[in-house]
Image (cartoon, rainbow, N blue to C red):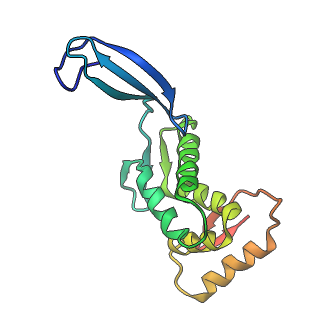
Amino acid sequence: MQCPYCQNTDSRVLESRSTETGQSIRRRRECLNCKHRFTTYERIEYVPITVVKKDGSRESFDRSKVLRGMVRACEKTGITHERLGAIVDDIELQLQQRPKREVTSQQIGELVLQTLKTESEVAYVRFASVYGNFQGIKDFVSTLDHLQQSSPTTESQLTWDDRTLIS
């Protein structure tokens, strides 16, 4: 590891510990040349995931976009930012575990909806309204009817079809 102060490549590890999320390891190091101490983080390098958007364009998966959408949907619901970060971590992990490196934006939206359904019904409806591009009150009523009909103990696979949730 190269020292950020003197650029020497010889250092020793003083301390290692896992971060709070367990996704990386924090290492405290000391340069053997200048004796300065610095911190490094080691994390798994994942193979990039490509997101296929509705218009057919492709872009790299950006967890911050998913988090931003969830933060907006969860405003004033009591769901903490830490919890939202953990949800996004879980969604990203699910995507990384898939054999295919391409995923549609629709599939990502469905994963978010499945999670929000168990976290907060208000956040679920808010996210669904943006994700589904609701045009009027009928779209909200349809989603609320679906929410009311589905049992909280039933974990059904949600799909999106013409702004209507189908289980």
Q: Nearer the viewer, residue 17 or 165?
A: 17
Q: Is residue 141 visible?
A: yes
Task: Name the residue at 20% across, 16% down.
Answer: 34
Q: Is residue 55 left or right of residue 144?
A: left
Q: Please state the horizontal and vertical placement of residue 103, each as a whole percent of the image.
A: 50, 47
Quadrant the N terminus occupies: top left
Query: Which residue is at the far bottom?
Result: 137
**Residue 35 in which image quadrant:** top left
45 w.r.t. 146: above or below: above
Q: Residue at left 63%, top 62%?
A: 116
Q: Is residue 131 visible?
A: no
In this view, the residue farthest toward the front is 35
The C terminus lies in quadrant: bottom right
Q: Nearer the viewer, residue 1 or 6?
A: 6
The image shows residue 151 at horizontal and vertical percentages of 82, 66
Position of residue 163 relative to residue 70, above or below, is below
- Front-most of 167 and 83? 83
Q: Which residue occupies the extreme left position in the image?
A: 6
Up-down: is 33 above or below 73? above
At 59% from the left and 42% from the top, the residue drawn is 94
On the image, the x and y values in percent for residue 134 come to 54, 79
The number of discs equals: 0
Q: Residue at x 62, y 82 (%)?
A: 140
Q: Position of residue 119 (x, y in %)?
A: 67, 62
